[in-house]
Image (cartoon, helix red, strand yellow):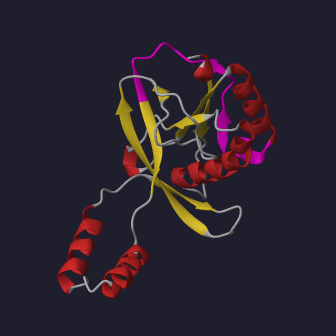
Amino acid sequence: MDHQSHYIELKAIPQVDMLQSEVVSYAMQILHKYLPHFDGRIGISFPAYGLGRTLGGIIRLFGNQEDIQVLQNALMQSDLENYVLISDAIKTPEIIEYRCYSRFQRKGQSAIRRAKKRLTEQHKWSEQVEQNMLNKQEQQDFLPHIHLKSATTKQNFILSVKVTVKHKAYIGEFSTYGLSSEATVPHF
């Protein structure tokens, strides 16, 4: 577990003019600037995931001791300190469970339009097919999410996060948001 031997915890500070979920979104926006420098070695967890249908007000970042200390020092120099309490690097406790936090992208209206165009060309489109797609879209579970702004395109988007319980650790790379479709982080 040396690759996730330490962690830091960011706790949202209540703000008069911001909801807790907005503070977490802002923290994630700042983290997205720093995490690429760690080449997929930093994983993220949300211990209060699902509380109030949000990601909760706590973010944990896992990595090796050196990476976590470098990240903690960088975050202390940012204005993030005005919005979250940033812990010192803490040794990860012995754990029995793991979680996999991954990005989930809902299929929206544009996906239905693309499918309609493709299936119309194949002469397979019908009102029944469209209704089935709309029904399936409505049945997708609500997932906690945050609102972000793309650094490259400058467009706003929603980052939905799905959590999966795992009973053993899976090693892998994390995205520039600290998420992964397979790699796990400790849960305690």
Q: Compared with residue 155, is residue 89 higher up or lower down, i.e. above or below?
A: above
Task: Using residue 177 as the reference point, say whether residue 55 is left or right of it.
Answer: left
Q: What residue span does the magenta drawing correspond to?
A: 78-98
**Can you tell which quarter of the image residue 99 is in?**
top left
**Can you tell which quarter of the image residue 8 is in?**
top right
Q: Position of residue 125 (x, y in %)?
A: 26, 84
| Of 69 and 13, the residue lying toward us | 69
Q: Where is residue 126 in the image (x, y as percent from the top left)?
A: 21, 85
Task: Name the residue located 71 percent from the left edge and 44 percent from the top edge.
Answer: 36
Which quadrant of the rendered structure holds the N terminus?
top right
Q: Compared with residue 122, is residue 55 higher up or lower down, i.e. above or below?
A: above
Q: Which residue lies furthest to the right in this view?
A: 77
Task: Name the residue located 60 percent from the left edge and 18 percent from the top edge.
Answer: 5
Residue 91 falls within the magenta-colored stretch: yes
**Can you tell which quarter of the image residue 106 is in?**
bottom left
Task: Name the residue located 68 percent from the left edge and 22 percent from the top edge.
Answer: 89
Q: Where is residue 155 in the image (x, y as percent from the top left)?
A: 63, 70
Q: Position of residue 42 (x, y in %)?
A: 63, 34
Task: Name the residue located 42 percent from the left edge and 52 percent from the top edge.
Answer: 144
| Of 48 and 96, the residue lying toward us | 96
Q: Compared with residue 108, is residue 95 higher up or lower down, i.e. above or below?
A: above
Q: Which residue lies furthest to the front in this view?
A: 122
Residue 177 falls within the magenta-colored stretch: no
Task: Using residue 184 as the reference point, say whether residue 124 is left or right of it.
Answer: left
Q: How many marks?
A: 0
Q: Compared with residue 30, is residue 157 higher up or lower down, i.e. above or below?
A: below
Which quadrant of the rendered structure holds the C terminus?
top left
Q: Which residue lies furthest to the left in this view?
A: 128
